[in-house]
Every structure is written in C-alpha cells, then in structure tokens.
Image: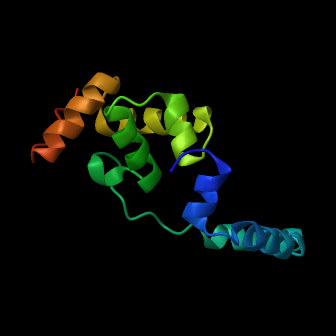
Amino acid sequence: MTGDPGAFREHHGRDARARWDAAWAEGGELSLTEAIAYARRARGTRDRPNAGWGSLTPAESEVAELAAVGMSNPAIASRLFMSRSTVKMHLSSVYLKLGLANRTELARAIGTRSAGTAPARR
C-alpha cells in the first residue's frame, strides 16, 4: 500500500471517510471524563518481556522489518502512514530492546532470527 488516497481507499474500503467522520463525531460528543476513560480502557497491561524479539510491539516489528530490507525512514513513514519522527522513535525502541546499534546490526539480527538463532547482545 502506498501513501496515495486511492491505495488508502482500496485498503480501508470505499466508505472509510464516512466511517471516520462518524467516529470523529461520536468522539466529539464525549465529555473530557468519558474521553479519558475511553483512552485508558485501551491501555491494558502489556504481557511482553522487556527485551528481545517478543518485547517488540507490532508497529516496532513492522518498522524493523522494513528498515532491515533497506527502506529509508521517509519511505517507511509513507508506507505505514506515520510520521518520520514516529519511525525514528520505533527504530530507537527496537535498537534498545534488541541491544543493537544501527540498521546493519538490525538486518543481521533479523537474518539470524529467520535462520533460527538469537541476536548477540552487546
């Protein structure tokens, strides 16, 4: 999926704008207290370890995979409909959680993970 509107509609359906508008209007009717309660419901406990492959969020995993195959931050941002800053933040989290320093180490770690071995910790 690319960053163009046609691809967005193809991926999310032709009525995506109408669903977005309806959800926006529904959210606009919430009081501040209701909005806070709604946001907190989405934040449950995380059953992920603190480090290693299992600690990555789905977004971090997706960004890591794309970075490891050589995509630039702007290209990843466009592909995943997020800002370049968000891509950079996800990559920083990935490096920290996996004990890596850069994209080269990330590509190597993903390659060894695919081969069934764990990445070496620094």
Q: Is residue 25 above or below residue 83?
A: below
Name the outermost residue toward the left: 116
Picture colour scheme: rainbow
Q: Nearer the viewer, residue 64 or 53?
A: 64
Residue 91 falls left or right of residue 20: left
Q: Quadrant of residue 74?
A: top right
Residue 106 falls left or right of residue 44: left
**Residue 48 in picture, x, y percent from top left:** 36, 59
Q: Nearer the viewer, residue 35 or 87?
A: 87
**Residue 88 in picture, x, y percent from top left:** 52, 31
**Residue 25 in picture, x, y percent from top left:** 86, 72
Q: Quadrant of residue 70?
A: top left
Looking at the image, which residue is at 30% across and 29% down? Answer: 100
Name the outermost residue toward the front: 6
Q: Quadrant of residue 49?
A: bottom left
Looking at the image, which residue is at 49% across and 37% down? Answer: 76
Looking at the image, which residue is at 16% across and 46% down? Answer: 114
Q: Nearer the viewer, residue 65 or 49?
A: 65
Q: Nearer the viewer, residue 118 or 70?
A: 70
Residue 111 falls left or right of residue 92: left
**Number of numbered discs present?**
0
Residue 2 falls left or right of residue 92: right
Looking at the image, which residue is at 35% across and 51% down? Answer: 55
**Residue 30 in picture, x, y percent from top left:** 86, 74
**Where, quadrant-wise, is the C terminus in this rendering?**
top left
